[in-house]
Amino acid sequence: MGRPYAVKGKKKRKLEGGEASRAPPADAEAVEQEVKENEEVMEGEAAAEAFAEEVGEGIPIVPQPVDSKRRPGAIFVLERACLEVGKVGKGMQILNSDDHANYLRKQNRNPADYRPDIIHQALLAIFDSPLTKAGRLQAVYVRTEKGVLFEIKPHVRMPRTFKRFCGLMSQLLQKLSITAVGRREKLLNVIKNPVTQYLPVGIRKIGLSYSAEKAVNLFDYVAKSNDDEPLVFVVGAMAHGKVDKEYSDDYIQISGYPLSAACCLNRICSALEQKWNIQ
């Protein structure tokens, strides 16, 4: 009687009592996980390619309200944002802990550190606020964990979904700038460090951290500031750690609890809206 072998065309493997044909549960789970990750990678590549075509034509902008009085506004600096491009499959993607956990582990990196969703939520908190819609957002600067600094114009229409946001950031970090639809105006632009050279001279820079020794009531703190000068708020956009206070004039804590970047920015915007009577 002939010996049973594996499928013809592949390397022959003797089956002992039929046991070898049954993959161990752990192996089956690993294969299933790998298939799932490959599907996600392919979806990510397709989404990135589709969005790259759209970005090539420019991204939309939001109509700006005309401020005839040219009143001072708010400037936000978001530090240590986790935005890193990696080659996954055939394309370049923003690495994140959900879709690229195995890829990151193979490179001895901690997937928990790759949280681009934090900066996405933080930017939505700023650009969705009445403060921005009233024309009182002056500038937004983002510095990544790798030290790449870029500026975002106040009238950008920020992508609502996470995948589209990652597509936009991937294009920005590769092309170094993104323009508006039908214009040459750069809405997102990679610029040289340090960020302080782009801030108005003598402007007050306020760093926020849960570890800061100075605890304040943010609404009272903002209310006491000078009405004629813009304010700079430095907020961390990373999963763990704190922002460096090297260029902050004041370093404050606004809650007895650790807050997410988005929650922190919501509080700042609300305090400024109350101060400037923005409904």
Image (cartoon, rainbow, N blue to C red):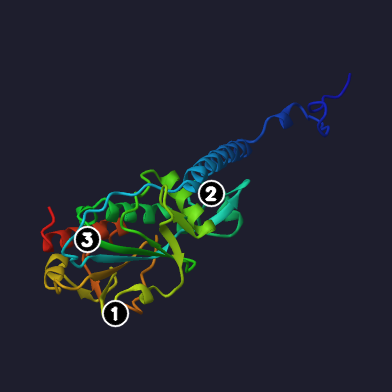
Which part of the image, by quadrant, shows the N terminus?
Answer: top right
Q: Residue 57 bears which disc, if any?
A: none
- Residue drawn at x 47%, y 69% is 147
Determine whether 124 is above or below 1 in the image: below
Among numbered discs 3 and 2, the one appearing first in the sequence: 2
Q: Name the residue under label 2.
A: 100
Q: In which quarter of the image is residue 154?
A: bottom left
Q: Nearer the viewer, mark 3 or mark 2?
A: 3
Determine whether 51 is above or below 232 in the image: above
Among numbered discs 3 and 1, the one appearing first in the sequence: 3
Q: Mark 3 points at which residue?
A: 136
Residue type pointed to by label 2: His
Q: What element carries label 3?
A: loop
- Residue drawn at x 31%, y 51% is 124
Q: How far apart are the alpha carbons under marks 2 and 1?
A: 42 Å
Please tell me how many numbered marks the rendered image carries.
Answer: 3
Q: Which of marks 2 and 1 is in front?
A: 1
Q: How far apart are the alpha carbons under marks 3 and 2?
A: 38 Å
Among numbered discs 2 and 1, the one appearing first in the sequence: 2
Q: Position of residue 85 (x, y in %)?
A: 53, 56
Q: Mark 1 points at which residue?
A: 201
Q: Are circles 3 and 1 on residues that touch, CB within 8 Å?
A: no
